[in-house]
Amino acid sequence: MKQALLTKKEQIGLYYLIKYPDFNDRELAEATNLKLSTVTAIRRRLKRRGYYYTEHLDTERLLGRFGLPRKSFYMVSDPNSEITLNMACNYTDIRRDIEAFQQYFSFHDMLEESHWNTVIFPYRLTDIINYFDHSRIVQCAFDLNLKPADGGTAPSEPTDVQKLSSKERKVFKTLVTNPELSDSQIAEKAGVSRQAVSAMKKRFLEDGLVENRRILNLGTLGYQIISMVHQKIKIGMPEKERERLVRRVSAEMPAFLFVAGATEFVMMTAHSDFQDYTESMTAYSTMMKSSGFSFENPVRIILSVPGMTEIRKHDYANIVDQMLERGD
């Protein structure tokens, strides 16, 4: 871990930058009890050093998958494993993609059946507990004991993209596919005024059509391993017990992605080294056993961060195009 390379103020600043991506520098200064000039300097310095990058995440639909390289918005791999996250408009589309994947890899003898795993989460039947919020990772890395900041409200039910006007669609696509651009640059690309972009962006965020995220660069922070766990839950487990277990696991595990359905959940976590990974998985197993219910052994996938290639980093361009085409 590269704890020594960051001062205490920078550690705190990084946590709040990741936790509250919608906060401006003044709001961050109030949350951190740091001077405004200090916050501005820390934000610029951490970004310049590559500790994080910014994304506007389209939240209209979610499908979690690993192993399928088609229509994906997030794909990472090392020489031994691959994790891929996809979105799809409906169940038929994703089943077609899964079958195409199986046929392709089987035909070329590239992947045995026992070596891949798929999980599908219908958006409206899924609890998205953590969607690439890396603040817990930062908190654990520096052993920070910080209180949540005031401000920030949960988004309402996502607006249907089909209800957007022609200008709103242009701004929406430009915003999602070019998250680092300023309002003026987005306005120039979309052919509207800067004031219109600011108003539309505010509404998109309030309506839950997009979410801001600052994505932590795990390698820069010194992490060595990313792991994904796919845990199935018995259908007969009482709903309250299942919800209690899922909430406990999501609260105690340093996951930056946690998605749960009625009979399974998936989480992605980061680890400083293999010993940290082993201790984390041991704690997880102990937690599951303490629930008093028996579970199948989870599917586990690990990737080496130093040897990892980020093939796609929240690339929503194709998905946005498909959504907008459905609205024509």
Image (spheres, rainbow, N blue to C red):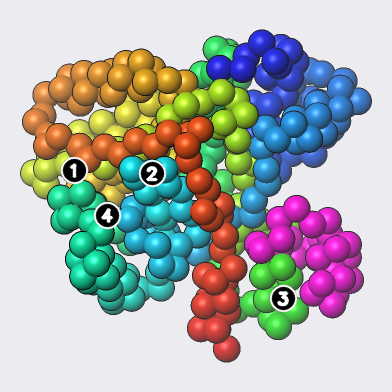
Q: Position of residue 63 (x, y in %)?
A: 38, 59
User: Which one is earlier in the sequence, the residue at label 2 or at label 4?
Assistant: 2
Res. 201 image quadrant: bottom right
178 within the magenta span: yes
In this view, the mark in front (4 or 3): 4
Q: Residue 297 or 326: which is nearer the viewer?
A: 297
Q: Position of residue 275 (x, y in %)?
A: 36, 15
Residue located beneath label 2 in the image: 79
User: From the viewer's perspective, is residue 64 above or below residue 53?
Assistant: below
Mark 1: give few (<14), some (14-19) or many (20+) Cα within 10 Å. Answer: some
User: From the viewer's perspective, is residue 255 above or below residue 4?
Assistant: below
User: Which one is earlier in the sequence, the residue at label 4 or at label 1?
Assistant: 4
Residue at 62 percent of width and 14 percent of height: 3
User: Which one is earlier in the sequence, the residue at label 1 or at label 3?
Assistant: 3
In this view, the mark in front (2 or 1): 2
Q: Quadrant of the C terminus?
A: bottom right
**Residue type pointed to by label 3:** Lys
Secondary element at tag 1 = strand
Residue located beneath label 3 in the image: 170
Asked if disc 4 and disc 3 are in contact, CB closer than 8 Å, the reply is no
Secondary element at tag 4 = loop
Label of residue 232 in the image: 1
Left/right of residue 323 with respect to residue 67 in the rendered view: right
Q: Position of residue 147 (x, y in %)?
A: 60, 19
Look at the image and give the residue range highlighted in magenta: 175-201
Asked if disc 4 and disc 1 are in contact, CB closer than 8 Å, the reply is no
Q: CA distance from mark 3 to mark 2?
A: 39 Å
* Total numbered labels placed on residues in the image: 4
Asked if disc 2 and disc 1 are in contact, CB closer than 8 Å, the reply is no
- Residue 266 seen from this side: yes
Q: CA distance from mark 4 to mark 1?
A: 10 Å
Residue located beneath label 4 in the image: 119
